[in-house]
Image (cartoon, rainbow, N blue to C red):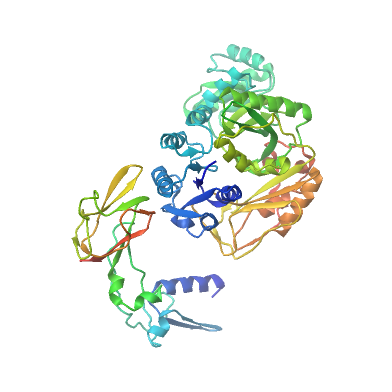
Amino acid sequence: MDQKDIQDLIKLINKSEISEFKLKEKDFSIVIRTNNYSKNNGTTVVTSAMPQMMAPSMHAPAMAAPAASSANLTSAPKAESNTEENAVIDESNLVVYKSPIVGTFYRKSAPDKPVFVKVDDKVTPGTVLCVIEAMKLFNEIECEISGTIVKVLVDDATPVEYDQPLFLINPA
Amino acid sequence: MFKKILIANRGEIALRIIRSCKEMGIATVAVYSTADKDSLHVKFADEAVCIGSAKSSDSYLNIPNIMAAAEITNADAIHPGYGFLAENAGFAKICEETKIKFIGPTAEMISKMGDKITAKETMIAAGVPCIPGSEDLIKSIEAGKKMAEKIGYPVIVKATAGGGGKGMRIIKSPEEFEKNMESAQKEAAAAFGNDGMYLEKFIVEPRHIEVQIAGDKRGNVCHLSERDCSVQRRHQKLIEECPSPFVDEKLRKKMGDAAIKAAKAIKYEGMGTIEFLVDKYKNFYFMEMNTRIQVEHTITEQVMNYDLIAEQIKIAAGENIVGNRYLPDGMFAMECRINAENPLKNFAPNPGLIKALHIPNGFGVRVDTHIHENYMVPPFYDSMIAKLICTGRSRDEVIRRMRRALKEFRIHGIHTTIPLHLALLENDEFLSGSYDTGIMERFDYDTIEE
């Protein structure tokens, strides 16, 4: 196994839910432990999907995979790459709705009107979440999934940039 | 003077502009794609706005997002750098309409010089020499011969539908005309299905020598002498030097005056460059005008001891040009463009992680770059990662300094063109100072040591 192979292996393991990986060859052995290792109390998890694996497969910790149908939707950081989010399992379900453009974020269509959405509101594809104004043009940002608003991440009349998180949505 | 400038660019030029702004007490806004979120220009600027995903069309060419970024940060001017939107007349127009100052010429000036035919007509009308050629297709061998006499041999006959060097023949004398014309036509008919031909003067041993100019609102124009950019591979510049080893005082005066004429003809505002082709007999011809700051502005800065980006900003803010011409006066400078490419594998682009880096320094050495140790060179943009500029009191001194600096420049983790530059700095043709744009065709790639 050369250095490139090892680098590839580490990348592959980091992307997976594995917490510890051991490989023994004739004149070479390697043990890789990820951030998940201590959380899982030393349980070794190996999946048979890995082509370099030689150990028998075991169950990986169950993870919900939220729907992400557009470039602007992304799930909250998954446990295998970021240990902090492990604490609350529910948060891994949430969808972070990000801004597709640059501009000023408004929660209402006009100052005297009500907000488009608030916490606990149900949304469906097509629900207008907010308006982002740029160059005197008002762009209505429509939701693309079904779910419930969990949190509004930006204050009214605040500038936002591309990919800035705007809402946390719990998909239905 | 502007209070806040948004830099609509990335990499080394964004850093360059930010640095001058800081010295002038102007606040800066960086814009960046998601691929550049950890980039130095983002860290150096006072504010930064993410404007899109990695692809240039989604970010650095995304006019609505860039204008929105200027709006939400209250920038009063935009510096476009080079490339991207720097010569986009539409973008300049939008800036004019939204009252955000585009640091550069007006949209009209950009359009005028952007169209090759209009540019040539404008130059001819202004008395700037252009490459003599036939206006229309050649109607017969006799008509062609007459035209060639008028232009002056040697001439080159070119296919109007042509490209890739096909359907072209160099004709050195009237005796050779008929057979070369027919041979070119046959080739053109076979390659493009069109045997229409036109004539142009053939520039013998062409040198690409450009003159830096600056113009202000009141119609004052000055020139800052020339740069020799003949060392090119596939029209990409590799090394530039100032002054040109081929240009003497007499030629400098003629070319400088022609460049000023060219700029005045369109009432040019801002920093610009007039590109000329110069033949071995020291005849020079207008090629095109670049209505922006150029990559190699650095060597003029070193020789003239002037911050050209600061000058650009001052002109845009309404200040006047001072003086008519700036001459090299005993100083010499050279720039090597360092690209993330493997010169031994046909210049294959080599994005990737820079694992270890040592940037050369010392007397007379300047490096304009955005790279650092652990920087991941992204695959989405131009492969140029650094500019190494050396200055000295003779061409010899500059060459010795450049060799030293190149050897000191260590970039580990990716292939770069540093070995190519080291080989070029030992190349006889380059060292002689008498080289033309064919130099890289004659270059022996076996002289490159990895």
Q: Residue at x 44, y 44 (%)?
A: B61
Where does the N terminus of chain B fall, quadrant-wise? top right
Q: Is residue B199 above or below residue B213?
A: above
Q: Nearer the viewer, residue B361 or B313?
A: B313
Q: Nearer the viewer, residue A74 or A133?
A: A133
Q: Tell me if residue B218 can be seen.
A: yes
Q: Residue at x 68, y 16 (%)?
A: B174
Where does the C terminus of chain B fall, quadrant-wise? bottom right
Q: Position of residue B102 (x, y in %)?
A: 49, 38
Find residue B242 and report its image quarter: top right
Q: Tell me if residue B282 can be seen.
A: no
Residue B83 shown left or right of residue B231 in the figure: left
Q: Position of residue B129 (x, y in %)?
A: 65, 21
Residue B135 shown left or right of residue A156 in the figure: right
Find residue B122 and report its image quarter: top right
Find residue A144 and report its image quarter: bottom left
Q: Position of residue A5 (x, y in %)?
A: 51, 72
Residue B25 shown left or right of residue B154 in the figure: left
